[in-house]
Image (tube, rainbow, N blue to C red):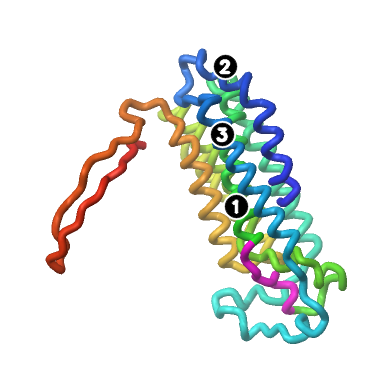
Amino acid sequence: MKLFSSLLLAGTLSSLAPSAATAQSASTSPYRTRFAVDAPVLVGLGAVSGFGLYRVQQKTGLNEAELAALSKNDVPKFDRFVAGNYSEKAQTASDLACYGSLVLAPGLLALNPDIRSNYGQVVVLYLETMATTAAIFTSTVGNVYRYRPFLYGSEGSASERSSKISTNSFFAGHTAHTATATFFAAKVFHDYNPDSPAQPYVWGAAAVVPAVVAYYRIEAGKHFLSDNLVGYAVGATVGILVPQLHKTTSGRGLSVTPLQGVNVNGYSYGGLRITKQL
């Protein structure tokens, strides 16, 4: 996941300029992208990801004494059933499902003629969406220490158990990035084909694939249940929200209105209400 995050910005910026220009001439697209807006956003996301990766490199793993002191009883009860899990086969399965979905999800969108006619713009949106999740993920794992479940057992090589990567349990990057990809694909398909009878199947597949990845990450001892739930929520939210914010609907801009009143305690308040129609 860290390698994917570090490579994401370069690929996005290299494709942004020509794709943004194409998007402006594509009248059938439900989205709008602008280089003047999206490029700075992507640079900012890349900076956040870069800082997160730097923070990850500053982390330290556990020594033998610290590993021996770990106890399953220190794990919250709803996560405790995962403590001690370890499976290389499950890890391989989660890698294949995750990285495969990152390629397959946007690839399947190209099969739709309307989407294919605006595919450059869709790729830009996809990369921007993935960059958003990458920024959230790297900045989180770079600053949060949570030990992976397999450390509470005896399996795993000595180098693996003492690695700084073993402190990156929260939150589940594979699950988050998979959910981002699948829900992005479902959202784009929905916006281009709002009346399609395939909608339930597309959304169903979008929900199931990251859940499968989460299952294998639990079996592999890489993440607790709560890590996966957070990763799933982050990925699904970003996958839907970023395309939605680019939709070309009437009233899509921000509106600011003054707000004032009196609360239940009798104190007056004032401020501004900022709204955006989705």
Whether 53 is drawn above or below 71: the answer is: above
Q: Amino acid at mark 2?
A: Thr
Q: Where's residue 124, x and y in %?
A: 60, 29
Earlier along the polypeptide chain: callout 2 or callout 3?
A: 2
Q: Amino acid at mark 3?
A: Pro
Q: Residue at x 81, y 72 (%)?
A: 162
Q: Amino acid at mark 1?
A: Ala
| Residue 136 visible (yes or no) | yes
- Disc 1 crowd rating (10 Å Cα; few below 14, some 14-19, many 20+) is many
Mark 3 secondary-structure assignment: helix
| In the displayed structure image, the side of residue 169 where residue 92 appears, left or right | right
- Disc 2 crowd rating (10 Å Cα; few below 14, some 14-19, many 20+) is some
Q: Which mark is residue 22?
A: 2
Residue lying furthest right in this view? 158
Q: Residue at x 76, y 82 (%)?
A: 66
Whether 92 is drawn above or below 133: the answer is: below
| Residue 178 visible (yes or no) | no
Mark 1 secondary-structure assignment: helix
Q: Is residue 149 a member of the stretch shown in magenta? A: yes
- Disc 3 crowd rating (10 Å Cα; few below 14, some 14-19, many 20+) is few
Q: Where's residue 90, x and y in %?
A: 75, 60
CA separation in Å, label 2 and label 1: 30 Å
Q: Quadrant of residue 145?
A: bottom right
Quick one: 169 or 82, which is closer to the camera? Answer: 169
Residues at circles 2 and 1 in contact by the CB criterion of under 8 Å: no
State which mark lies toward you, 2 or 1: 2
Mark 2 secondary-structure assignment: helix
Residues in magenta?
A: 143-152
Q: Which mark is residue 176?
A: 1
State which mark lies toward you, 2 or 3: 3
CA separation in Å, label 2 and label 3: 19 Å
Q: Where's residue 15, x and y in %?
A: 66, 26
